[in-house]
Image (tube, rainbow, N blue to C red):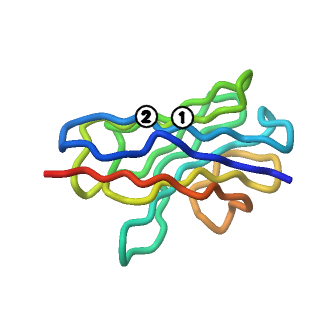
Amino acid sequence: QVQLVESGGGLVQAGGSLRLSCAASGRTFSWYAMGWFRQAPGKEREFVAAISARGVSTFYADSVKGRFTISRDNAKNVVYLQMNSLRPEDTAVYSCAAPGVIGPPRTTRDEYDYWGQGTQVTVSS
């Protein structure tokens, strides 16, 4: 059973930074791409970033490009999301996700089978 546990959320002022972590267990972590999504109140869950199994390739939503960085440590079974220059519109519950099959990084939520419980990020103006 794949389990994903996020941590690192919190309250930060606009312009500040946070680093989210997602610890994975239940299968060989290094074989699978990983992704981060977020959901703001009243909005649909949206793609934020994705990373290939070995960390060579990364993809970002246009809204976070240049501010957020996704990375992973396969020795620790952890994927990270470094968030800099945070804006109030980044406020959301952030969740990591894992696909059920081996393949390239995915950018749509329907392509992910496993989800963490999410961590709240609140950016004050």
Q: Residue at x 36, y 45 (%)?
A: 10
The residue lying toward the viewer, choosing from 107 and 43, is 43
Give the percent coordinates (x, y) of residue 37. 51, 56
The residue lying toward the viewer, choosing from 34 and 105, is 34
Crowding near the residue tagged with mark 1, few <14, some 14–19, many ≥20 C-alpha atoms within 10 Å:
many
Task: State yes or no: discs 1 and 2 in contact (Cβ < 8 Å).
Answer: yes
Total numbered badges shown on the rendered structure: 2
List the residue tagged with mark 1.
Answer: 80
Tag shown at residue 19: 2
Give the percent coordinates (x, y) of residue 18. 36, 36
Dot 1 amino acid type: Tyr
Q: Secondary structure at mark 1?
A: strand
Is 91 above or below relative to 10?
below
Crowding near the residue tagged with mark 2, few <14, some 14–19, many ≥20 C-alpha atoms within 10 Å:
some
The outermost residue toward the top is 75
Q: Earlier in the sequence, mark 1 or mark 2?
A: 2
Quadrant in the rendering for residue 55: top right
Is 12 above or below relative to 88?
above
Give the percent coordinates (x, y) of residue 6. 57, 46
Quadrant in the rendering for residue 83: top left
Question: Is residue 26 rendered to the left or right of residue 57?
Answer: right
